Image (tube, helix red, strand yellow):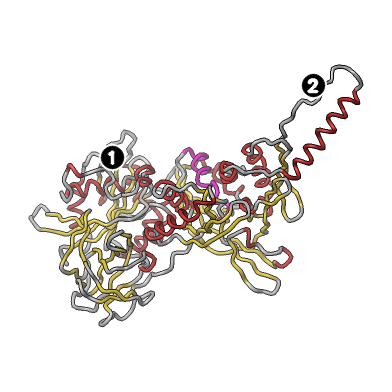
């Protein structure tokens, strides 16, 4: 155990975490140069394209130090986005130390700070690492100053590296061995192991990623998951070295995988404790909680006959993504579909792209919503995330909406623009403080419903890309909630309904009507597009009809002849409108998703 080091790399998005992982893997030669590819731990195309880690990975690195000692370095990779903060916390709970990666040109950002606090909660030994020192814009002295002032760490212990060029990697590996503590635990105690991730293999079932704190495990053992009391017989245990390497047994302090014929990923919950069925440990490891979705949207197939294919695709995706939840849903406009819950907007985008790419599905997504809490007149409470289930407004006593505590770090020249953006979104400015002479952290309390649309994109544009954003959900607060319906030719389109704050109803309705009028093709009759709250119409756009020039044959004569022909045409259009159906194209639903109320 004295020769094992379990550590994680934590960083803000795009500070070079995946590139540094690549260099560490190359330095230990576990992958032949001809098999090596950039971002080797990022297996999904979407991760490579966006430069973010979505699914965390683990790799066991054999390392020989300068004095000839052989060490095992277990790198437990973590996702790099705020949506997956629970997964990050479970991965950190499996480590004794962390490398805090900071971009030499960008400096300390919001998630750098958030991840550091998360690591400190787990009492991890932290090594600051300044990356991208090869960039012309690198300002190492300023970053060291930020490490001292913002993070309270010793800047002299910071290790300078360029993950792209491989500079400073040997020094970093020596520091991991020298500064990070070895794991504690007794190999002969009852088994106590923490699940920090899992993924699905089509041939072997669920593969559980875990860290052993006490005891040992081998093939043939009967294990039990403590959160749901499911028992399984272990078929194989081993280490991750990019490929899976089976071992006879794993003991306290080690990080590896187990295969036990587990059918679905949702049976293995991140943060759960594994123990032996016949010799259980005293209690589960702390920190386990169910992953709760915060953003909800309905998914429908573009063609009604593709419903079965979409159902199969979601089942397969659920095998790889335990945090996705879904249930059957139906809409008068779009037919049969599914109501899905996501950890956040990035998670929603990832699921949408994976359905389209990996499973070749053409889908329509409805407007994302959050979960509201309603208190009815008889004091019963109900949670609602689907506008279709919104009860009669006269039966509602109070409506409460979820709030977040947002931490935004920006250069001070953008303070006014960020303040305006947050106050326009019904934000409450709680605090702001200067982190350095020209960077400040602004704390806002914001309704989650105002953030899930386009807040992050707007923040990036008003701060020219320098703003960084991190949030946590705090509580429910009183709000004025209304249901906004969109009517096409007097018919309510349930898939376009939204639950919005009363203040936002008019602007959302206006933008939705304008966008729809651009997307809906013209017919032989006028199409009225209206936004309504209850029985009150609050906005309207009209798609004009195609018009035939019926007066062309009148050359001369009295005006009444022309008027007679126009009246006849008008009656025909009216009759056509009564029987005519307006088909909404897919682009119309997507246009409403991109509403920008500013």
Q: How many marks?
A: 2
- Within-10-Å neighbours for mark 2: few <14, some 14–19, many 20+: few
- Within-10-Å neighbours for mark 1: few <14, some 14–19, many 20+: many
Residue 430 at least partly seen:
no
Q: Residue placed farthest to the left in the image?
A: 68
Between 146 and 232, the one lying in front of the other is 232
**In front: mark 2 or mark 1?**
2
Which contiguous range is marked in magenta?
448-464
Q: Is residue 588 above or below residue 559?
A: below
User: Which residue is denoted by mark 1 in the rendering?
Assistant: 133
Provide residue 588's location: percent of width, then percent of height.
60, 42
For mark 2, give the secondary structure: loop
Q: Dividing the picture into quarters, in which one does residue 67 lie?
A: bottom left
Query: Magenta region, mostly helix, strand or loop?
Result: helix
- Confirm whether the magenta stretch covers residue 452: yes
Provide residue 46's location: percent of width, then percent of height.
38, 46
| Spatial CA span between label 2 and label 1 | 76 Å
x 26%, y 58%: residue = 7
Residue 117 at least partly seen:
yes
User: Which residue is denoted by mark 2 in the rendering?
Assistant: 552
Provide residue 141's location: percent of width, then percent of height.
32, 42
Quadrant (top left/top right/bottom left/bottom right) for the N terminus: bottom left
Provide residue 206's location: percent of width, then percent of height.
31, 64
Between 84 and 183, the one lying in front of the other is 84
Q: Is residue 270 above or below residue 424?
A: below
Between 582 and 164, the one lying in front of the other is 582
Q: Dividing the picture into quarters, in which one does residue 77 lie?
A: bottom left
Tell me if 482 is positioned left or right of 413 in this view: right
x 73%, y 42%: residue = 528
């Amino acid at each position: 155990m004295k020769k094992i080091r379990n550590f994680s790399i934590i960083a803000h998005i795009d500070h070079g975490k995946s590139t540094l992982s690549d260099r560490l893997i190359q330095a230990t030669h576990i992958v032949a140069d001809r098999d090596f590819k950039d971002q080797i731990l990022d297996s999904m195309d979407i991760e490579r394209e966006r430069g973010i880690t979505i699914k965390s990975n683990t790799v066991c690195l054999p390392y020989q130090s300068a004095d000839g000692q052989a060490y095992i370095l277990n790198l437990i990779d973590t996702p790099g986005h705020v949506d997956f903060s629970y997964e990050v916390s479970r991965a950190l709970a499996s480590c004794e130390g962390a490398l805090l990666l900071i971009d030499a040109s960008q400096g300390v950002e919001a998630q750098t700070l958030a991840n550091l606090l998360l690591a400190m909660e787990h009492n991890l030994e932290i090594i600051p690492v300044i990356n991208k020192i090869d960039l012309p814009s690198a300002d190492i002295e300023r970053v060291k100053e930020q490490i001292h002032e913002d993070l309270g760490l010793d800047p002299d212990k910071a290790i300078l590296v360029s993950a792209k060029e491989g500079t400073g990697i040997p020094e970093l590996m020596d520091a991991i061995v020298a500064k990070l503590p070895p794991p504690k635990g007794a190999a002969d105690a009852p088994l106590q192991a923490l699940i920090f991730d899992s993924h699905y293999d089509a041939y072997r079932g669920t593969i559980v990623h875990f860290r052993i704190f006490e005891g040992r495990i081998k093939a043939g053992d009967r294990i039990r998951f403590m959160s749901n009391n499911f028992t399984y017989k272990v078929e194989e245990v081993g280490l991750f070295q990019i490929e899976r390497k089976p071992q006879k047994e794993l003991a306290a302090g080690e990080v590896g995988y187990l295969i036990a014929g587990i059918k679905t990923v949702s049976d293995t919950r991140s943060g759960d404790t594994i123990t032996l069925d016949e010799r259980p440990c005293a209690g589960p490891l702390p920190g386990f909680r169910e992953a709760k979705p915060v953003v909800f949207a309905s998914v429908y197939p573009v063609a009604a006959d593709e419903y079965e294919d979409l159902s199969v695709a979601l089942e397969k995706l659920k095998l790889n993504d335990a945090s996705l939840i879904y249930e059957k849903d139906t809409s008068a406009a779009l037919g049969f579909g599914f109501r899905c819950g996501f950890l956040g907007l990035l998670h929603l985008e990832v699921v949408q792209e994976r359905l389209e790419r990996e499973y070749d599905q053409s889908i329509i997504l409805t407007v994302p919503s959050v979960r509201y809490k309603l208190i009815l007149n008889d004091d019963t409470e109900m949670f609602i995330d689907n506008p279709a289930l919104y009860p009669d407004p006269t039966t509602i006593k109070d409506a409460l909406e979820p709030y977040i505590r947002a931490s935004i770090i920006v250069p001070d020249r953008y303070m006014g623009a960020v303040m305006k953006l947050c106050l326009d979104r019904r934000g409450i400015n709680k605090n702001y403080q200067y982190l350095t002479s020209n960077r400040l952290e602004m704390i806002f309390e914001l309704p989650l419903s105002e953030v899930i649309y386009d807040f992050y994109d707007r923040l990036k544009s008003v701060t020219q890309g320098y703003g960084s954003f991190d949030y946590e959900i705090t509580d429910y607060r009183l709000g004025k909630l209304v249901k906004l319906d969109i009517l096409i030719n007097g018919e309510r389109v349930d898939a376009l309904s939204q639950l919005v704050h009363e203040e936002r109803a008019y602007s959302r309705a206006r933008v939705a009507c304008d966008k729809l009028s651009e997307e809906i093709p013209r017919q032989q009759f006028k199409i009225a597009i209206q936004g309504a709250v209850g029985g009150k119409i609050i906005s309207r756009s009209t798609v004009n009809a195609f018009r035939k020039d019926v007066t062309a044959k009148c050359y001369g004569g009295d005006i009444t002849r022309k008027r007679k022909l126009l009246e006849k045409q008008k009656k025909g259009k009216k009759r056509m409108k009564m029987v005519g159906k307006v088909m909404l194209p897919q682009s119309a639903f997507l246009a409403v998703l991109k509403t920008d109320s500013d």
